[in-house]
């Protein structure tokens, strides 16, 4: 693993050469696929060839081929030597589930990226080598396509393929991923995780998942402590038979000593929080860029003031960056796996935008990122906006900002989700308020305005919702000069607050998860929704049902 790390860091010295090599490998890998032959991609030798042969693509360009693959025809997108292992389900941004092919090469690259991240992280936090890991994943085999290919989450496949010695480090076994019901899965996870006082690393995709688990543990602490003491599981009847069989031995262990420790923590502090029951934790690993950054303040409330390390910009379509330090959302572009192209953010809507290779980026500028991968995708636009924060050698360091679709523009203000997150996060710190979730959305009026949706109970202790909204409005004007101009000119009215009843976000999250697909751990709450009718529809659909 350390050799892989050294090779990766060495490759960063000549980004252009490695990217051109990867492009040639990927063209050769899938050159005899139906898609490649139909478009003449098997003749591509250079980036210029690729651009001449194929415009920028989206998922719809591959949908017909993926349907054939799901029916058992992998050659639709993949070369004859490129074995299909599974389909990773992506929740997407505005549409239903997308089926992303995962191949042998893709999986090897994906695992190598995690190994590079892992060895660097563990070397910088050596105490974790003697401690355990709490990681949340979802199953790679939630169901099968009509051709018999597993469909699910790639992290579940990686967990299932780990060596026995590595699996022994994980407090939560892979069998937990087989539990489909979110409530049962979370409770079973906590039942096993709280029994382990030697946790050194806590990791999942979105920090909101860890916050939700911490609150659930505190809310149901009496049941959990009793289960640990008695070797039982309160929600046993909600588990599928195969998962229960795999977990029965671990759940059946009575641990009155640990239960006593947890009971004393709850009695002493009045709550049961991870910072108290996992005192040896060295690191939390979650996404920190984009909307995920809005949850970091609340994360520290529950998990304590320990380092947080981003585990990189990744999607079902590919792993893009590898962070190499704590407290930074930016990571080194993984130039050894996919071939990357970039469109300057300001040219994205142009008919013929500038297209750059990785080594041509400029520090401080924002770009849309395009991927050519071993999954049979070429020049694939995942609608991610990234910022180049610097370089490691000649290879760019990239930070995820937001999805391109998460930009609201009523009167020319062009508010991005990352700007909303920055404004709200700053005000939450200043006012010492914690929000479970929030969403900012525009409202059409004369003049139009923006509103913040949040549950009223979050302001019960402070009663400062009006002050909070005023400060967010002011901070957003500082961040976005166009928004300031529109506010000062009267083209946009002041931001308002739309209070929601207890449980409204829970209903919304459940419905959105069921509609979009993807795993529970990867679910991203939208902090900015550009739809002018969102607030009205939300009230009609979720507030009434929550009430």
Image (cartoon, rainbow, N blue to C red):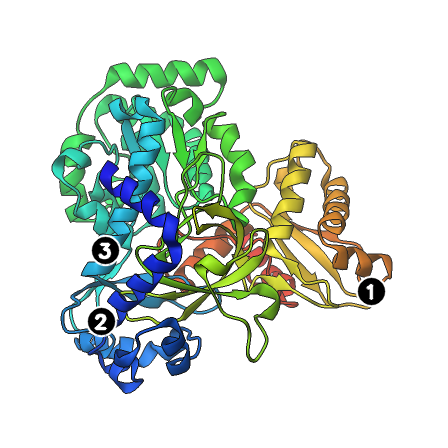
Mark 2: give few (<14), some (14-19) or many (20+) Cα within 10 Å.
some
Mark in the foreground, 2 or 3: 2
Quadrant where the N terminus lies? top left
Q: Which residue is mark 3?
A: 107
- Look at mark 2 in the image and give the residue it sits on: 28
Pick whichever of labels 2 and 3 is earlier in the sequence: 2
Task: State the residue at coordinates (78%, 67%).
Answer: 445
Residue in the foreground of this view, choosing between 340 and 80: 340
Q: Is residue 272 visible?
A: no
Question: Which picture quadrant has residue 466?
Answer: top right
Which one is earlier in the sequence, the residue at label 1 or at label 3? Answer: 3
Left or right: residue 438 versus residue 220 is right
Secondary structure of the residue carrying tag 1 is loop
Give the CA separation, mark 1 to mark 3. 50 Å
Residue that numbered label 1 is attached to: 491
Point 72% across, 62% down: residue = 413
Q: Secondary structure at mark 3?
A: helix
Secondary structure state at the residue bearing disc 2: helix
């Amino acid at each position: 693993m350390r050799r892989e790390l050294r090779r990766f860091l060495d490759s960063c010295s000549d980004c252009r050469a490695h990217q051109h090599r990867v492009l040639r490998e990927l063209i050769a890998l899938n050159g005899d696929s139906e898609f490649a032959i139909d478009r003449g991609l098997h003749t591509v030798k250079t980036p210029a060839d690729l651009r001449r042969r194929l415009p920028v693509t989206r998922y719809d360009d591959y949908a017909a081929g993926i349907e054939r693959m799901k029916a058992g025809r992998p050659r639709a997108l993949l070369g004859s030597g490129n074995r299909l292992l599974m389909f990773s389900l992506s929740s997407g941004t505005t549409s239903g589930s997308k089926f992303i092919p995962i191949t042998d090469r893709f999986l090897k690259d994906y695992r190598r990226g995690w190994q590079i991240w892992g060895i660097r992280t563990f070397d910088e936090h050596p105490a974790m080598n003697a401690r355990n890991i709490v990681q949340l994943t979802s199953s790679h085999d939630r169901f099968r396509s009509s051709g018999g290919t597993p469909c699910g989450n790639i992290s579940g496949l990686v967990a299932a393929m780990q060596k026995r010695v590595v699996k022994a480090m994980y407090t939560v076994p892979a069998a937990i991923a087989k539990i489909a019901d979110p409530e049962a899965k979370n409770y079973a996870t906590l039942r096993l995780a709280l029994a382990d006082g030697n946790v050194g690393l806590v990791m999942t995709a979105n920090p909101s998942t860890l916050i939700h688990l911490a609150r659930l543990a505190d809310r149901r602490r009496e049941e959990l402590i009793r289960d640990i003491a008695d070797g039982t599981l309160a929600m046993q009847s909600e588990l599928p038979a195969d998962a229960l069989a795999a977990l029965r031995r671990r759940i059946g262990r009575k641990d009155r000593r640990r239960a006593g420790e947890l009971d004393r923590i709850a009695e002493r502090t009045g709550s049961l929080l991870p910072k108290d029951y996992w005192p040896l934790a060295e690191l939390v690993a979650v996404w920190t860029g984009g909307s995920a950054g809005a949850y970091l303040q609340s994360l520290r409330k529950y998990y304590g003031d320990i380092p947080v390390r981003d585990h990189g910009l990744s999607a079902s379509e590919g792993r893009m960056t590898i962070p190499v330090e704590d407290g930074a959302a930016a990571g080194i572009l993984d130039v050894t796996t996919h071939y990357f192209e970039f469109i300057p953010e300001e040219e994205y809507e142009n008919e013929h935008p500038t297209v750059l290779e990785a080594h041509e980026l400029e520090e401080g500028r924002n770009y849309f990122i395009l991927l050519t991968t071993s999954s049979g995708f070429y020049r694939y636009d995942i609608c991610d906006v990234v910022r180049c924060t610097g370089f490691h050698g000649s290879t760019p360091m990239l930070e995820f900002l937001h999805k391109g679709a998460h930009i609201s523009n009523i009167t020319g203000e062009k508010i991005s989700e990352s700007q909303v997150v920055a404004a709200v996060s700053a005000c939450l710190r200043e006012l010492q308020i914690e929000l479970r979730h929030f969403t900012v959305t525009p409202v059409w009026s004369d003049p139009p305005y923006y509103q913040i949706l949040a549950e009223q109970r979050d302001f019960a202790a402070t009663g400062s919702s009006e002050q909070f909204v005023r400060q967010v409005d002011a901070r957003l004007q500082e961040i976005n000069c166009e928004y300031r101009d529109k506010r000062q000119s009267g083209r946009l009215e002041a931001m308002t607050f739309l209070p929601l009843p207890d449980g409204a976000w829970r209903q919304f999250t459940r419905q959105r998860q069921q509609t979009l697909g993807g795993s529970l751990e990867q679910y991203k709450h939208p902090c900015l929704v550009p739809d002018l009718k969102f607030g009205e529809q939300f009230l009609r659909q979720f507030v009434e049902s929550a009430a």
